[in-house]
Image (cartoon, rainbow, N blue to C red):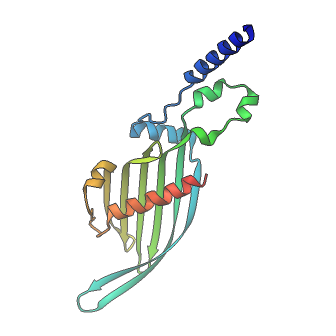
Amino acid sequence: MKNLFLFFVHFVSAICISQNIKTDFNKQFTIHEIDSICSLKGPYITSEGKITSKVETIKSKKGVTVKNGNGGFDYSLYLHDFNEENYNKLSNIEQRKYDFNKYLKLIKANYHEKINYQISYSEIINGQFYYSADTLNYVKVKIIRTENKKKETSDSLNISISELNKIKVIKTVFLFDYKYWIINKNKEILKIYNRK
């Protein structure tokens, strides 16, 4: 009976201790806090590649003009360990066995794309995607087009996902569909993140 009582006491105390170690995956960071965390820790995952593109422009008398372009893109994904305080309390042996993937969550992703077209024309697209518990919350997108290496035109969008979902199509000065682009880039970011 004494052993049963001791077992019960140890079991209850173990449960209480394990309940005390909480991780707040749903903690809502501000954009400024996320940027601060990312600048301190640096990117966790990076991915890059090459792009080829064609742009058709319609001119009234000359017909359709096609511009070919080449360039590159890169993704930088930033993760945050929501259990970092508890990790620092562990012994060295426990830290070696620690499962980082269990507590690391996506908080931000940066996307950068640059394409140089024929006839001195280039396009740069920068996107910043902000996440909470791996769910997209806020997006900043900026497009810069340069013609003849001098004339620069830009357009930008800062929008929360709740606002984005209410709108069917968001077109830019360049007839660029922001909503379609954001949805596709988010899918690519999550695909890269899930490979970690």
- Nearer to me, 72 or 166: 166
Q: Residue at x 40, y 82 (%)?
A: 67
* Quadrant in the rendering for residue 97: top right
* Quadrant in the rendering for residue 33: top left
Q: Residue at x 25, y 57 (%)?
A: 167
Give the residue furthest to the right: 93
Judge whether 182 appears above or below 105 on screen. Answer: below
Residue 40, horizontal then vertical, whole percent = 54, 38
| Horizontal relation, residue 91 to residue 46: left or right | right
| Horizontal relation, residue 132 to residue 101: left or right | left
Judge whether 172 appears above or below 12 on screen. Answer: below
* Quadrant in the rendering for residue 147: bottom left
Work out which quarter of the rendered image holds the N terminus and state it.
top right
Judge whether 117 appears above or below 114 on screen. Answer: below
Q: Is residue 193 shown to the viewer in this render?
A: yes
| Horizontal relation, residue 7 to residue 19: left or right | right
Residue 103, horizontal then vertical, whole percent = 57, 38
Q: Is residue 160 shown to the viewer in this render?
A: no
Residue 134, horizontal then vertical, whole percent = 47, 46
Give the residue furthest to the front: 1
Residue 166, horizontal then vertical, whole percent = 25, 54
Q: How many marks?
A: 0
- Nearer to me, 126 or 44: 44
